[in-house]
Amino acid sequence: MCLSPNLAIEVLSAGNTVREMDEKLHDYFDHDVELVWYCDPVQQTVTVYHSPTDSRIVRYPELLTGDPLLPGFTVSLPELFAPLVAP
C-alpha cells in the first residue's frame, strides 16, 4: 500500500527546471495527491494545482486559501513570503 499526501508544497529555486517541475507535478497527481502548491519566492507567487491542467496563480498581496482541502485556512502572500526573523 502506498500512502500519498493530500497536499504537496514545493518551494521553487533557481536550479529547478520547467521540465523537472512538470514531471513532479504529474507524479504527484499520478499518486493521488489532491492539491499542489508551487511557491515562487522570487516572483512572490503561488501556483495552485488541482490537476496538471487546472491551475491558478495567486499573486502578491492576495490570500492563499486551502479550499477545498483545508477549509478555513488562509495566509496572505506578504505573510507567507515575509523574511524569517530569528528570535
Image: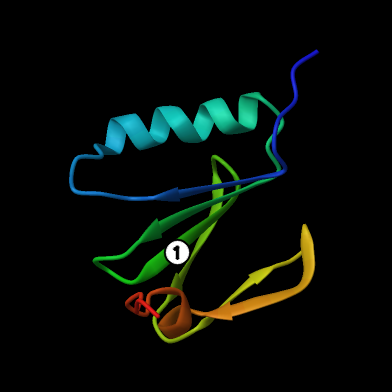
In the displayed structure image, the side of residue 63 where residue 67 appears, left or right? right
Nearer to the camera, 58 or 1: 1
Quarter of the picture holding the N terminus:
top right
Which residue, as the protein is rendered here, is positioned at the far top? 1
Residue type highlighted by circle 1: Val
Across and down, in percent, residue 20 comes to 32, 30
- Farthest residue to the front: give it: 87
Helix, strand or loop at label 1? It is strand
27 in relation to 77, above or below = above
Position of 43 with respect to 10 (left or right) is left
Q: Position of residue 58 (x, y in %)?
A: 48, 72
| Residue located at (45% from left, 31% from top) | 24
Estimate how packed mark 1 is, as few (under 14), some (14 to 19) or many (20 or more) residues with alpha carbons within 10 Å.
Answer: many
Q: Which residue is mark 1?
A: 46
5 left or right, relative to 55: right
Q: How is the image coloured?
A: rainbow
Vertical comparison of 43 with 32: above or below: below
Give the camera-side residue of 83 and 41.
Answer: 83
